Image (spheres, rainbow, N blue to C red):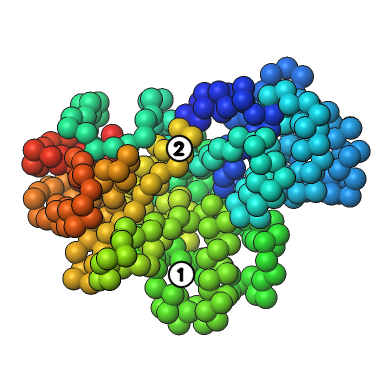
Amino acid sequence: MFIPRTLEPIFMKQNQLFPVMLVAGPRQVGKTTMLKHLAEAGRTYVTLDDPMIQTLAKTDPKTFLDRYPAPLLIDEIQYAPELLPYIKMKVDNDSTPGQFWLTGSQQFQMMKGVTESLAGRVGILNLYGFSQDELKRRPCKPFLPRSTYKNATEELNIVDFFHQIWKGSYPKLAGAGDDFWEVYYASYLQTYVERDVRALTNIAKRTDFYKFVQLAAARTGQILNYTNLVKDSGLAQGTVRNYLSILEASNLIFFLQPYFNNINKRLTKTPKMYFLDTGLAAYLTGWSNPKVLEAGAMAGAFFETWCISELIKTYVHNGKRPSFYFYHDKDDREIDLVIEQDGTLYPIEFKKASNPGREDIRYFSVLEQFKKPIGPGAVICGISNWVPITKEVIAVPATLI
């Protein structure tokens, strides 16, 4: 059963403006499924996962585009960047909107090639796994704390909620039983290493890379500590940085940057790292079912990771780039998330428990040092309905973000 994506109307609107459209994102999040669903009659589909087609695209891109004329959907464009200059020539001769639809799952190298070859000719959007809004067929808007929220339509059961966190957001798992969970993620990682990682770098030992990914997953929701990663992995610092860049390029992790200015030297300047899919992180860290995850030592980190991922999707799936930061200073005063919009700062805390209070927002006032307007704040937590904490801060159920 096809589940509509929030990004669909955004894509079709931009498709009326640009001759080329690119949907980027991690592997197996539904990029191709969405575009096939949107494709009009007559649009040809071709995937560069096919070795013979990929070889033709790389060695003779002109013949490839003659054989597969527009309107055309090309899947996994990162495997044949040689096509991009020829697509440019095509759309320079005919700038009709919507001729070429592209998908890709490697961010850095692919985006460099796209922006260099197709600048001004391509609309670029990102797609991640299902959001809870999509799974519940709800409208989705970019999240900002507000003074009131719609009432919850269901009671929050924390064990059921952690089942959602544990299962993850990949479409193939949406309607599958829990017995498919381990098989799916094992296969996903094997495919990821064999295709994406090998395309991005030469790995001396695949076991070392897999161990590193496990170590990274165990640090989701934490400030990145290169020294500890180097020590625990036994890898050189340069290799650790390279492997982190691979995970970021593959859209598996997200770096949340600290909010600071040049005046205050006491602020942390190292990012926090989050896995974009909590199911994958749970698999990598060995949590075999949602009950043990919810009761385990990493429950808070997984709750925060899931919330960050959901909030990112509310922006990205609406075609917007989130201005997300966190605050942490040398006195260990921390705000989990700071959203900056139109010059205003919105502080947000994440709390797995269902009893939020003033103690959870005690550091919100430190944002005043930046001399910018402070908007309403929120504590996203495990309650069943929203409640005010102060006049400017409310507690929001994680199920409503």
Q: Is residue 145 above or below residue 59?
A: above
Residue 344: mark in rendering: none
| Three-letter amino acid code of the residue under disc 1 | Leu
| Nearer-the-camera pick, 303 or 59 | 59
Element on which disc 2 rests:
loop
* Disc nearer the start of the sequence (2/1): 1
Q: Is residue 383 above or below residue 295?
A: above
Location of residue 214 in the rendering, given as x and y in whole percent from the top left corner: 48, 66
Indicate left or right for 105 with 129 as reference.
right
Q: Residue at x 25, y 67 (%)?
A: 264
Q: Residue at x 66, y 41 (%)?
A: 119
| Nearer-the-camera pick, 309 or 262 | 262
Indicate left or right for 117 with 261 as reference.
right
Location of residue 340 in the rendering, given as x and y in whole percent from the top left corner: 32, 45
Location of residue 352 in the rendering, given as x and y in whole percent from the top left corner: 23, 51
In the rendered image, the quadrant that contains the N terminus is top right
Classify mark 1: residues with Cα within 10 Å, few (<14), some (14-19) or many (20+). Answer: some
| Three-letter amino acid code of the residue under disc 2 | Lys
Q: Is residue 400 above or below residue 350?
A: above
**Disc 1 target residue:** 215
Residue 320: mark in rendering: 2
Q: Which mark is nearer the camera, 2 or 1?
A: 2
* Residue that lies at the very extreme toward the top in this rendered image: 41
| Nearer-the-camera pick, 371 or 220 | 371
| Nearer-the-camera pick, 60 or 93 | 93
In the rendered image, the quadrant that contains the C terminus is top left
